[in-house]
Image (cartoon, helix red, strand yellow):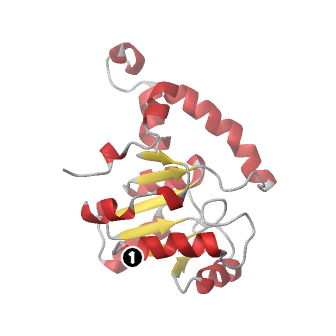
Amino acid sequence: NRDKEDGRDGFSLSRRVRALFFPDLIISSPQAIDYGQLASSGFRVALVDIDNTLACHGSHVCDPEAAAIIKKIQDAGLVPVIVSNARTERARAYAGSLQLEFIARAKKPDARAICRELESRGCLPEHAIMIGDQLLTDVWSARRAGIPVILTDKRSNKEIFTVRLKRPIEWILIRCGGKARWQALRDNYSSLIKE
């Protein structure tokens, strides 16, 4: 019973976890996202993470897979912007290899840099979409900024130590928020697509 799961007052732990850490959609790869469907639903800007979303961790230049993803985003009429916690030099090098604008040292889950970027573009949060692979950075920052978010499976199992430390916390958050509800988000565009 959903009432029991959520609690009568609507402020249960599972509901709070879902509000902060559950994405709108879970998908295998940024390559698998239907960007045309997003654009036709009013999305204008795609905020895309680098590490383990577009690229294997630590990449300084794009590879053909990342270039193909960015082309799909642009062909759909969306403006891709790199959003990364990486140092400025690396984010600049990576974004430059794709000829994209970027936000470096975004300090996700802090949402201020993201909000400033959208404001500078005259883009409302509901017209932007965040795409990333981590709950505690990408999803949480999007939620704090009021931006819909797509979580992708991580591109590679190679992750830095600090990210590996976060993965068990993600597992706990998924259990707290409700595994069935989590699984219902996979390949389900219903919360993103406006009829």
Q: Pick whichever, 171 or 71, lies toward us.
A: 71
Task: From the image, tell me which residue sits under label 1.
Answer: 75
**Residue 43 at x, y percent in the picture:** 31, 65
Q: Nearer the viewer, residue 111 or 161?
A: 161
Q: Considering the image in quadrants, where does the N terminus appear?
A: top left
Check the image and report above or below for 28 versus 15.
below
Residue occupying image coordinates x 35% and y 47%: 189
Q: Tell me: 20 left or right of 125.
A: right
In the orientation shown, which residue stands out farthest toward the right?
161
Q: Is residue 57 above or below residue 169?
A: below
Above or below, 136 relative to 77: above
What number of labels is visible?
Answer: 1
Report the side of 147 relative to 28 (left or right): left
Residue at the left extreme, as displayed: 195
Residue 97: x, y in percent? 62, 85
Q: Quadrant of residue 39?
A: bottom left
Amino acid type at circle 1 is Asp
In-image side of 2 versus 97 (left or right): left
Label 1: which secondary element: helix
For residue 75, say whether it is visible: yes
Q: Position of residue 169 (x, y in %)?
A: 66, 37
Which residue is at the front of the view, 146 or 60? 60
Residue at image location 55% in from the left, 55% down from the top: 29
Q: Residue at x 41, y 39 (%)?
A: 19
